[in-house]
Image (cartoon, rainbow, N blue to C red):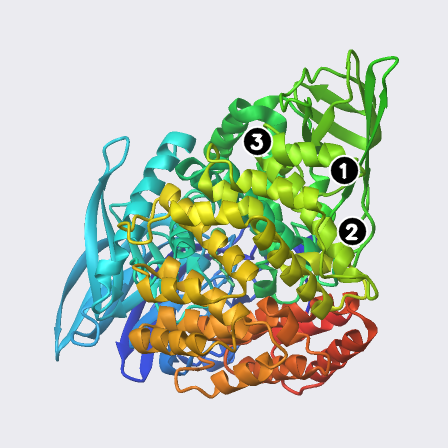
């Protein structure tokens, strides 16, 4: 494959002024006519041809200003159209006709059909699969789109912008015309046509614009869109209040589609969603699903300003829209739900997905400087670490100046395709801060380590804290210079109260209030008048995306786990104590992994769990054990997943036994028949009760209460929680198979619940799991053509079943690799995404490590591998 480099960026030779598209849809084919108004850019020689991108295209006709272009003036291949002898300076109109077969488009990029519905997905480079085009984000134009289709097959015809015209064509066909006045890049184009149900609601913006909101679903499912509609309205209001951003068209439409490569897509005025992130009701969806819908609806809506009104100059700037928009959706969820719980969730995700990426062979900076396949860069690093960088800017500047910087960004760059440099410059201008050193975060890959050492001198009543940052050179080789690290902290007394944070800095740092900003390799901070040794609560709220190395004594850690007034750090203190103990137990091949947790640690966990003054959702987080994958990452070398699993299992039993009275009390206070409400508080109550149930069954080794909860459940959250306990911990119990069959029979016709059914079985930890998933892959409801189904079975097995996937004989690796090879011929983007699971191969004990490496090499040697999958496999082996 060819490598694209940021340093090679240059603007196009031609300007695009307007686009008119006509899309005619028929059974088995689509005819596309694109009329492009273009002109040669000043200074570009008349001999320079126009080169348009294509991908698997068939040209049927080409005209210049209405006249057919002679065949010696152009070259058309499936992936490019080159036209010579174009006017020197005048505008000209190029009319391009292509013909496609949407039914055969299994990659789900470009124009395809999902359950009979025609739809498009263009980011990053899908528009070139519809017509030849300057398919890059810095080419902006207004679009006018006419869609024609059979009335019965597609009564609904949608595109970007505002509807301007529609009518009858005779022959049972009709048309609609849509006009999008906002300049946009091709990746934001969308069209949907089909027999859809819809719900509409009005929304009036702060300045009085009347907008009609629409959500479209497959027939018979529109009643499941109510929560999404509610989340959309709350998102619109929040963006007005928090960022002063209003919506700008007469309509805003969302369409839910069954076959979709990712979560959703922010096309201007016409968001297209994976239906998993729209369709909900209490019978089919869990609380986590509700939270997911709220987040994704908000995220795509927020893109209207951060992504659409202001877009990216090139794909290297992807974090300009994604990191910023994730930051915005995180802030929205924190405001709508509970701040600490949201932050804990975001940090857990960052550590589970971004840290391993940043510490392995697929490492890349938040703004990469080269790629072979851009779709492989929609990563946790670009999205989630990208959001952390925006969060750090907000922390460094403070809320007021951060908002001023955002306002300036919207004012300066509205309508542009711009860069990270331009974004950062707005915050520098608004605050008078020099952010040039901070900008290294965008260029240097890797997770820095923040080392914290403390010393207390009782005679002098002085407490001294030393901070040091280090970054080791990883696969990306992007440098290790010191970065700007905001470190929020508190000095907690034995009574759990924060002391005065005033301290004196020595070295490359500054301190203001409870924030130390480390700018050089190291610095120390001295706190005087400390009559007793304070408990240092450092990196509060995870104020920088770093690995913390703090050799704090056990007494302080336990105090913080019980009393830190910063709840985020209270959670982290407990979760680190547990994580460290489990990593110890999981790593030692001779040690005893049956009592992995010291009593004092369990008591600290139970203190939070039993504290009724705390938010139930927080309490549920406080006693949730780390994922096996997180423990494996902490062990880092010679990992044996079986040992890690055993350590976690015995910790569950230990906590369950010691906490029995607490968990019993929590269960007593829980009414499983209470009417379902998806709000955060109710969800938190369910989370806590279901965590308690899991510990109780671990303590008693009796599935009875889980079986009863499954049968009595009045919502999917409680039902799935019970079923997960049964499938994961009581696989031999006859009632488990009965419950799994029951779920299947109840929901056989609901693909979203079937995904849960597949995923739950794929995640059940056992050495026989590979046989189980192999059997499920033969199930009539399994198909490689639906990304959700593939993720549910293959993706879940490969990422959430450490014991099964890493079976010592390597058959788990082999099974996944075989599926990926098949999938690659159908949908390379999804194959490449799942293949990233192999990237951690160097961290396993020698036998498994060698087997994963062989699996990767065998994959690499397959002829005709897509460039998506090849890129991941080759970089993983590096
Ligand atoms: N921008 C899209 C992701 C497109 C992925 C292309 N491979 C969804 C989002 O981030 O909002
Ligand atoms: Zn996004």
State the quadrant of the N terminus.
bottom right
Image quadrant in which you'd find residue 5: bottom right
Q: Which x, y percent locates residue 822? A: 55, 85
146 over 596 or under it: above or below: below
The label number, if any, that marks residue 554 in the structure image: 1
| In the rendered image, the vertical position of residue 101 relative to residue 397, given as above or below | below
Look at mark 2 in the image and give the residue it sits on: 478
Taking the spot 56% from the left edge, 80% from the top edge, the residue there is 824
> Secondary structure under badge 1?
helix
Residue placed most toward the observer, 615 or 352 = 615
Tag 3 secondary structure: helix
- The quarter of the picture where the C terminus appears is bottom right
Q: Is residue 148 left or right of residue 268?
A: left
Report crowding for label 3: few under 14, some 14 to 19, many 20 or more residues within 10 A (C-alpha). many
Residue drawn 43% across the image and 66% down it: 704
Whether ligand 2 has any atom under 8 Å from the Cβ at mark 1 is answered as no
**Nearer the N terminus, badge 3 or badge 1?**
3
Front-lying residue, 454 or 788: 454
Residue depicted at 49% across the width and 38% down the height = 413
């Amino acid at each position: 494959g060819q490598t694209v480099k940021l340093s090679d960026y240059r603007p196009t030779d031609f300007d695009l002024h307007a686009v008119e598209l006509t899309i005619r849809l028929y059974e088995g084919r689509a005819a596309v006519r694109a009329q492009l108004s273009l002109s040669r850019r000043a200074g570009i020689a008349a001999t320079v041809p126009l080169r348009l991108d294509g991908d698997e295209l068939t040209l049927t006709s080409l005209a210049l200003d209405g006249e057919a272009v002679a065949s010696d003036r152009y070259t058309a291949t499936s992936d490019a159209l080159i036209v010579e002898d174009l006017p020197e300076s005048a505008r000209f109109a190029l009319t391009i006709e292509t013909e496609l077969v949407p039914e055969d488009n299994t990659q789900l990029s470009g124009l395809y059909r999902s359950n009979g519905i025609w739809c498009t997905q263009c980011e990053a480079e899908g528009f070139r699969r519809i017509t030849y085009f300057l398919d890059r984000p810095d080419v902006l134009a207004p679009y006018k789109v006419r869609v024609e289709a059979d009335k019965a097959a597609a009564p609904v015809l949608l595109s970007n912008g505002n509807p301007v015209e529609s009518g009858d064509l005779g022959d049972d066909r009709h048309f609609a015309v849509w006009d999008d006045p906002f300049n946009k890049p091709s990746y934001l184009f969308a069209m949907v046509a089909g027999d859809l149900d819809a719900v509409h609601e009005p929304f009036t913006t702060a300045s009085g614009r009347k907008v009609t909101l629409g959500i479209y679903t497959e027939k018979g499912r529109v009643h499941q869109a109510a929560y999404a509609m509610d989340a959309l309205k709350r998102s619109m209001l929040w963006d007005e209040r928090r960022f002063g951003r209003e919506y700008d068209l007469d309509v805003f439409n969302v369409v839910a589609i069954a076959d979709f490569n990712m979560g959703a897509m922010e096309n201007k005025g016409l968001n297209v969603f994976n239906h998993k992130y729209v369709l909900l009701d209490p019978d089919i969806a869990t609380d986590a699903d509700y939270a997911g819908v709220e987040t994704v609806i908000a995220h795509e809506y927020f893109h209207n300003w951060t992504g659409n009104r202001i877009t990216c100059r090139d794909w290297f700037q992807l974090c300009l829209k994604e990191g910023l928009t994730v930051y915005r959706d995180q802030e929205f969820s924190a405001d709508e739900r509970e701040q600490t719980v949201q932050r804990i969730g975001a940090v857990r995700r960052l550590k589970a997905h971004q840290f391993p990426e940043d510490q392995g062979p697929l490492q890349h900076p938040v703004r990469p400087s080269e790629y072979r396949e851009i779709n492989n860069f929609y990563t946790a690093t670009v999205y989630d670490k990208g959001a952390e960088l925006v969060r750090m800017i907000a922390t460094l500047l403070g809320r007021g100046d951060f908002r001023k910087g955002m306002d300036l960004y919207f004012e300066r760059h509205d309508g542009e395709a711009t860069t990270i440099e331009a974004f950062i410059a707005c915050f520098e201008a608004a605050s008078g801060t020099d952010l040039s050193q901070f900008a290294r975060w965008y260029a240097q890959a890797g997770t820095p380590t923040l080392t914290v050492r403390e010393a207390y001198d009782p005679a002098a009543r002085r407490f001294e804290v030393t901070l040091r940052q280090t970054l080791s050179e990883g696969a990306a080789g992007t440098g290790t210079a010191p970065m700007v690290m905001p470190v929020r902290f508190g000095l907690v007394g034995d009574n759990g109260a924060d002391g005065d944070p005033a301290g004196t800095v020595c070295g490359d740092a500054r301190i203001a209030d409870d924030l130390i900003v480390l700018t050089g390799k190291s610095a120390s901070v001295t706190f005087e008048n400390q009559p007793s040794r304070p408990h240092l609560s450092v990196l509060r709220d995870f104020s920088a995306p770093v690995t913390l190395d703090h050799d704090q004594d056990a007494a302080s850690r336990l105090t913080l786990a019980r009393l830190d007034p910063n709840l985020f750090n209270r959670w982290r203190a407990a979760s680190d104590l547990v994580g460290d103990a489990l990593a110890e137990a999981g790593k030692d091949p001779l040690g005893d992994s049956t009592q992995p947790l010291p009593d004092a640690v369990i008591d600290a966990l139970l203190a939070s769990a039993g504290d009724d003054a705390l938010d139930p959702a927080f309490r549920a987080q406080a006693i949730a054990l780390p994922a096996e994958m997180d423990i494996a990452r902490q062990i880092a070398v010679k990992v044996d997943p079986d040992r890690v699993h055993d350590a976690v299992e015995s910790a569950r039993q230990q906590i369950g036994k010691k906490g029995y009275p607490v968990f019993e009390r929590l269960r007593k206070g829980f009414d499983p028949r209470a009417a379902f409400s998806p709000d955060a508080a109710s969800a938190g109550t369910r989370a806590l009760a279901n965590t308690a149930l899991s510990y109780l069954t671990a303590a008693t080794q009796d599935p009875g209460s889980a079986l009863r909860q499954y049968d009595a459940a009045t919502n999917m959250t409680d039902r799935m929680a019970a079923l997960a306990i049964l499938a994961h911990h009581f696989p031999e119990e006859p009632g488990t198979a009965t419950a799994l069959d029951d779920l299947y029979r109840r929901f056989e016709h609901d693909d979203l619940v079937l995904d849960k059914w597949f995923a739950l079985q794929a995640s059940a930890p056992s050495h026989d799991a590979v046989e189980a998933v192999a059997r499920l892959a033969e199930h009539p409801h399994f198909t490689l053509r639906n990304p959700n189904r593939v993720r549910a079975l293959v993706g879940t097995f490969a990422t959430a079943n450490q014991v099964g996937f890493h079976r010592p004989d390597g058959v788990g690796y082999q099974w996944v690799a075989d599926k990926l090879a098949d999938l690659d011929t159908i949908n390379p983007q999804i194959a490449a995404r799942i293949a990233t699971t192999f990237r951690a191969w160097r961290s396993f004990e020698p036998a498994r490590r060698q087997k994963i490496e062989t699996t990767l090499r065998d994959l690499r040697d397959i002829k005709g591998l897509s460039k998506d999958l090849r890129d991941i496999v080759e970089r993983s082996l590096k």
